[in-house]
Every structure is written in C-alpha cells, then in structure tokens.
Image (spheres, rainbow, N blue to C red):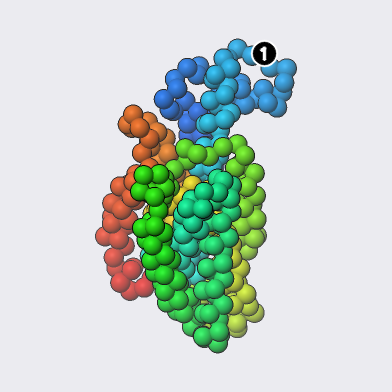
Amino acid sequence: MFKKKEYQKKTQMCFFGCYLVLIVLLLIVMLFSFYVGRFSGIEFFDAPKILLSKIFPWIHQTWTDTAEAVIMNLRLPRIITAVIVGASLAVSGALYQSLFSNPVASSDTLGVSASAAFGAVLGILLNISEIGIKMISFVVGCIAVFVVFMFSSKISKGRNLTVYLILIGMVVSSLFQAFLSLLKYMADPEDQLPKITYWLMGSFSNVALEDIPYCIGCFVIGIVPIFLLRWRFNFLSVSDYEAKSMGENINLLRLITVVCATLLTSSAVATTGGISWIGLVIPHITRMVVGNDTRHLIPTSALMGGLFLLIVDNLARSLTVYELPISVLTSLIGAPIFFIILIKNKEKIVHGN
C-alpha cells in the first residue's frame, strides 16, 4: 500500500512538472510573439510595459504610440486567438478520438469543419459583416452536428451509436463539401472567390480586439464542462455494458462530448477559417507524453495545442514577405509528424490498442 501511494505521488509530481513546463513555454512564446512581424519598432521591454499600463495607468510612457497600437490592436488579439483556437482544436480532437476509439478521428468526422466552412462562405457570398460571417459559420456547424446526432440516435436505437455517428457524419460532411464547392462555383471570381479561398486556408490576420470576448466566451462555455468531467471521459473507451455496470450514463456522456467538442471546433473555425491537422496530431503527441488517461490528456492537449498553433502563426508571419496561410504550414508540419507517429505506433494501431 505504501509503495502504491508513493508511486501515485511520484506520478502526480511528473504530471504537475509537465503542466508547469508547458505553461512556462507558452508564456515565453506569447511574450516573444509580440516582437514577431513586419513592424520592428518595438523595444525589448515595450510589450510588458504596454500591457501593464492598461492595468496600472500610472506607469510612465516610454514607448511610441505606433508601438502601442501594434501591440494592442494587432498582436495581442492575434496571440490570444491563436492560443485559444489551438487549445480548442486539440481538445476537441482528443475528445473525438476518445469518443470513437479511433486514432484518426477529428473534427471532420462529424462534419463540423465542412459545415462551419459552408456557413462562412455563405456569409461571404451574401456580403455580410465579419461578425455575421462568424455567427453563420458557428450556427451552421452546430446545426449540422445536431442533425448528425439526432439521426444517429434514432437509427441506432441506443446500440452502436458511435458507428452511426461516424457513418452519418461522413454523409453530412460529404454533402457540405459538395455545397461548399457549389458556392465557390457561384462566387464572383474577381472579388469573392479569392476571399473564400484565402479564408478556407485559415488566417489570424483579420482578428481584432472585438473578436476576443466571443472567442473567450465560446472557449469557456465549451471547456468548463470538459474540464469538470475529464475523468469520466475514460468511460468512452469501454463498452456500453461495462459503462452501465459502473453506473455511468454513457449516452448522456456521449452527448456532452459531442456538444462541447462541436462548440469548440465550430467557434474556432468561425473565428479563423479552416486549420487542419491540429485536432489530429496534437492529441497523439500528448498521449506519447501523458498517456491515455483523459484526466491528464485534456489539459495537456489544450496547452500543447495553444503552444503549437502560436509557434506556427509566428512562422506564418515571419518566414516570407507576405503572410502564409496557417493551414499550409500546419499541413507541412503536421503530415510528416503524423506519419512518424503512425510508423512508431503501428503495432498499437493494428491491434487496436
């Protein structure tokens, strides 16, 4: 008993150390990100002093008004959004993979990404405001997943629900991809089509301070239930019979999983456009560090997802004269990483472990 308690204590200390390292790295990269970009007229201590001056007004101004405008209006919203979107996509990917017990499950499995992208493109064609585009994208993404879950529940009648979720999700995703192609065909090739194409590749360039409350609000609403119930998501990997024998309402847990993961994904897509590979690769990397226990998998995925996407965004706005779309870099980085993970874990994947 004593050895078991000592082992558990050491394990908890290891997890705590992992969280601490990731948080420190994230804070360092966030601070560094204020100095990345085409505008280079920011001194080393300007960023922290500008941020602190908004809390403590008595701090004497030693920076230029231009530097303050760049920090507050351009880089701060971008940094916050990159961290939140990365965390949202990584956590939702981890939840989908746990829900379906499938290593290649992601936000595309239920058609969330395709339907949210369809809503945004529809908003672009209707020439509505940026806020309106994001709201349509978010609402359509949520409606699509509600339809998938409703039909899956009725068809499955309580049996093999996850199988029907995958199958009907594939159908809905394919339909929205077709609708999306139709909208692109109908778009004005001189004005609307380039905007649609650029949006579908993902970017943080249009994020403003006004978007931060929406982004944080959706993230908090989606992540709080996940964080509070994170230990119960381990039941998703067992059979329905085993879960019920342990007193778990597995169908309610699946519904909570789908709702929260969809909220995180659709709000992320609505904010920045399509960003691929985050929800697929980051949970796999996280499992290599902390294992499959969702108590540790979910918070670690959030930290790693935010850190990874923030680094990629820094590369996107510094590698070339013109800013690169985010999905280009996430695909170039994520695809090789996922291939390496597949090679290293081929035995586990083949045997379903």
Give the residue at mark 1. 60
Up the image or down, 99 lies above or below 326; here it is below
265, 177: nearer the viewer: 177
SS at mark 1? loop
Q: Residue at x 53, y 39 (%)?
A: 207
Q: Residue at x 49, y 47 (%)?
A: 272
- List x then y, in percent, for residue 146: 57, 71
Q: Quadrant of residue 314?
A: top left
Up the image or down, 98 lies above or below 32; here it is below
- List x then y, in percent, for residue 30: 51, 34
Q: Quadrant of residue 231?
A: bottom right
Q: Could you tell me if residue 289 is visible in this image?
A: no
Q: Quadrant of the N terminus?
A: bottom right
Q: Quadrant of the C terminus?
A: bottom left
- List x then y, in percent, for residue 95: 51, 63
**In screen coordinates, is 25 left or right of 329?**
right
Up the image or down, 94 lies above or below 174; here it is above
**In screen coordinates, is 241 left or right of 107?**
right
